[in-house]
Every structure is written in structure tokens, then in C-alpha cells.
Amino acid sequence: MINRIVEFKNSPTTKNLREYYSTNSLMGIYDINRKEIRHTSFLKWLFDKETAISELSLRKLLDVIVLKSSSLDDELQQLLTIGNYDIEDWKVIENHSISQGLVDLYIDLTVNSCQIEIIIENKVYSSEYDDQTQKYFDYFTNNNEKSTKIFLYLTPISSLELDKLNEPECCCKGFTQINYQLIVDSVIEPILENGVNQNIEFILKDYLKALSTPVKIKQEKFKNMAISNKENELLIRFWEENEDLILKAVEATRDNSHIEPEKREVARKISELLNNKEEKVGAYVKRNLMQLFEQNKISNQEVVDFQDAGFSKRTFDIQYPLLKKVLNSKDKPLHYWKDTVSIYDEQYYICCKWFEWFEKDNNNDRVYFDKWLKTKLI
């Protein structure tokens, strides 16, 4: 165990995480990283015409709208999906004043002579009041019939929770709910990957840190609002490298009478979940898949399909392709088991990111896998 602790301290992953979390964001320093109006101000800057990356940001936001909104007509949806369009003009207004109140963010743009109005209601750990969204919806739908209206309800809800929603959480169901993680994944990180000047890069990365930092306001602790891909990969690698030490720490906390009762109770619940005697869904999936591969019950076409993220999501409800071909044995990808399987003379990694929620509902990965497995056992 001493050797493992030394390995943990000297691990590049641990060092990178320690370095990342040892600094605070500017929003954190000013204690405003959960102030709703400050996040709205950042979004205003991101899309404002005076900002160097604003047109690219708007295009990325329109990509999100194509993905999530059902309010676009077929012609406009096709245009935005293809991406062969010009943004002729736009304006962005923060706290846009209308007779029904103040709209957090209003974007009016013209795309190939088509006027689009984007109305964003932003909620950061606060609740809607006085039927705001319904009033905004009624106001804009009764004005300027020639424009396309897009209503977005932005919250810090997790992507897993967002995917499980059947309708937006706001009063008006004419809104489309999105989350900050979508802004990170589909707007900010693609812009960083595209390359920007140092000042813009600093602003964007600093904002990512503000989103990912948990905070405590009075007695209530708020989790992160979104997390960057780099931080997410570091944390996953940290877990994969140190699962044994984490379990030991949980067990030590659970049984230590000098620890506060609340923390011991949290540790007890974590310990019960991690040490559940029932075969965990990941082990269950891996065991059955290995048997099917060994028995040659998986076709060539299925191997191709399993390498497609969309097919894997629809079939198993997982976030990554079920299989990933081994290209370099020294470079194991994240989210996959380290041991490989041989299929038709090729080596593949199998996705290890399988989850089973507390609720025994149809959203469990085990339910999806069992439904598919039955088709192979007939």
C-alpha cells in the first residue's frame, strides 16, 4: 500500500489535477461564478458582434439549435444543417426589455435573408417566477410573424438528466431546454480547437474553470455547471489509476469515529454502491460480450456498427462506440477496458462506460443491453 501511495503522489495525472485545481478562475476570485447575471454577460460577450469569435460562436449555437430544437421549418433546418449560409447581420441584447419583463438574452440575426430571433432564459440554481417563459413566448409569437422564433431555456442540469427529460422544466413547453455542458461541448471547446489569439484563449479557458468549480453558498453546496473535455479526461484517468486507493479511503472514512457523522454516512453509501455483491453492469456486459465473440455470434456488419457512436447510443444507450479498433497498443483510449478482444483477426477495445441508475427504469444501460442480448440468444 505504501508503494501505491507513492505511485499516486508521483502520477502525472495527479500532478496535472493538482496543478489545475490549485488556481482559481477570475469569476471565482470575485465570488461571482454562480451569479446568473454574470453568466448571461459572458454569453452576451461570446455572441456580441464586437467580439472576434462572435460569428463562429453563433454558428456553433445554431448547430446546437438544429440538434435540440423542433421549432425550425424543414427548409431552415436543412440550411443550418448543411452550414452553407451567411450570417448577414445580428445584434445581441442582454436584459432585453419588453412589456412582459426582461429577457435574459435576445439575439436577432439574419441568415440568408431569413430573420431569426433567439430568446434565452438563463437559470443558474434559481427558479422561474411569475410564469416568465410563458409571457415571453406569448409576446414574441404575437409579434413579427415573418421571423423564426427560437426559445431556449438554459440551466446547469447535467447531460444525463437533460437526456431523460420528456419536456422542458420551465412553465412554457414551447421552450427547448439546453444546458451549460452543451455550450461547452458544442460552442466553446470547438472554438478553442479551431485556434484563437492568446487573450481570447485565456478568457474561454478561465470561464471553463469557473463552470467546473463546485461552490458552497451559505449552507448549500452546488456542483459544477459543466466540465471541459480535458478536465473530464483527467478525472476519468484519475479514477481508473486510483480506484483501489479511493475505495480504501472511503472504507477508512466510513469506520472512523473521529469523522463527522454526515461524512461517515456519505462514505457508507458510497461503499455500499461500490461493493454491491450483485454483478455490476459493466462486468455483466463484458462477460456476455466476450462469450458472444468467442462463439462467433457477432457478424462482420455488427462489428462495423459497433464502431459507430450513433448506433451504439441507439442500441445500448452508451455515450461512446461499443468497439474501438486497436491502432497503437501503447495508447489505450479513455472509456475502454485495457484488455482487448480479437474479432475476425483484428484487435478491439470494448467500451467500459456502462451505468445503472438507482431507479429500475428503462433508461438503465443493463435494460438496453439485455434487450439486444435476447436477440443473440434466440
Image: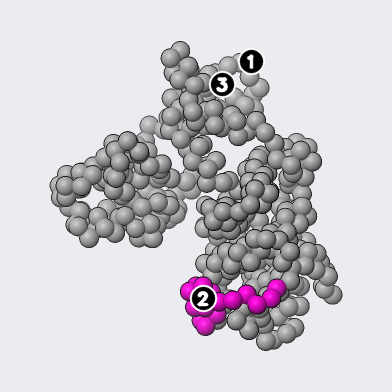
Q: Determine the image quadrant of residue 65.
A: bottom right
**Residue 2 % position (x, y):** 46, 12
Q: Which amino acid does label 2 sit on?
A: Asn
Establish if 258 lies above or below 342: above
Establish if 222 lies above or below 73: above
Q: What stretch is highlighted in magenta?
A: 74-90
Crowding at label 2, few (<14), some or many (≥20) Cα neighbours within 10 Å? Answer: few
Q: Which amino acid does label 1 sit on?
A: His
Earlier-in-chain disc, 2 versus 3: 2
Q: Mark 2 points at which residue?
A: 84
Residue 269 left/right relative to 136: left
Residue that lies at the very extreme toward the bottom in this rendered image = 146
Residues at marks 2 and 3 touching, judged by CB atoms closer than 8 Å: no
Q: Quadrant of the N terminus?
A: top left
Q: What residue type is labelled 3?
A: Thr
Q: Name the residue under label 1.
A: 258
Q: Determine the image quadrant of residue 90.
A: bottom right
**SS at badge 2:** loop
Q: Name the residue under label 3.
A: 253
Establish if 30 lies above or below 85: above
Q: Quadrant of the C terminus?
A: bottom left
Is 96 contained in the magenta span?
Answer: no
- Residue 122 appears in the rendering: no
Judge by depth and name the residue closer to the eye, 283 or 48: 48
**SS at badge 1:** loop
Crowding at label 1, few (<14), some or many (≥20) Cα neighbours within 10 Å? Answer: few
Residue 97 left/right relative to 18: right
* Gap in angstroms between the C-alphas marked 2 and 1: 64 Å
Judge by depth and name the residue closer to the eye, 9 or 314: 9
| Number of marks in picture | 3
Residue at the (17%, 44%) spot, across then down: 294
